[in-house]
Amino acid sequence: MILFFPAILLSCEALPINYSRSQSWLIPGVAHNEDGGGKAPDKSWTTVSLLGVQIDRKGGWDSVEREITRLAPLFFWNQGCRMVTGDEQPVYAADIQIREREFNLSWRTKRSLAVEVRIWAFEDAPGEIPFQEQKLPLAAGRVVAVGERSLSSSDTTGWMLSKAIGKAVKELSAHGRSR
């Protein structure tokens, strides 16, 4: 009985255990169009622009879209890709697609979450071209999670976005650094 009671509490996540996770970024010199005098060197190996963020989800998607739009440049920076500013011409263009779907499994409602990051050479980016005429991206990364998580959790959204960007840039880096 002594072992059974804690097992029940843990399986139902009934214990009031809270946690927090934090992350920070330093974006030195070149990222701010400064000369970088005395600052850490720019670690980026290429530039990218964000074409857009599309979310397929029931209700409340606008706050998730804003969060992803604001986090994406930071996660690209972690991978060595600097978002362009002003009228600077980027080398690559990226598009982010997010999906959250609910389905029933027995008596429980589960969610399927997917985050896709697709990267094109800037001149090949889809823009207003009809889908059937678009070129394939140079690289893509996709992360899928199935369970009880939701995109409403910033922790889940940030983790999945970071992983998807990392996977796409990893595939791109061999091609990009040889350009």
Image: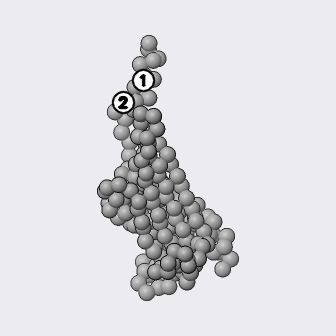
Tell me the kind of residue under disc 1: Ile
| Quadrant, the N terminus | top left
- Res. 109 image quadrant: top left
Picture coordinates of residue 65 (x, y %)?
A: 37, 63
Residue 91: image location, x then y, percent: 55, 80
Query: What residue is shown with label 1?
Result: 8
Name which residue type carries label 2.
Ala
The residue at the point 45 percent across, 17 percent down is: 4
Left or right for 138, reference 162: right
In the rendered structure, the answer to whether residue 79 lies left or right of residue 63 reads right
Secondary-structure class at tag 2: loop
Q: Is residue 92 above or below residue 140?
A: below
- Secondary element at tag 1: helix
Q: Are marks 2 and 1 in contact (CB under 8 Å)?
A: yes
- Residue 172, located in which quarter of the rendered image? bottom right
Residue 11 percent location from the top left of the image: 44, 29
Instruction: Tell me what residue is drawn at x 47 percent, y 66 percent.
Output: 96
Instruction: Determine which quarter of the picture holds residue 54.
Output: bottom left
The location of residue 26, given as percent across then percent down, is 44, 66
Query: Residue at label 2?
Result: 14
Where is 47 relative to 101, above or below?
A: below
Using the image as rendered, state which of residue 99 and residue 12 is in the foreground.
99
Q: Mark 2 and mark 1: span between their CA atoms? A: 9 Å
- Badge 2 crowding class, 10 Å Cα cut-off, few under 14, some 14 to 19, many 20 or more, is few
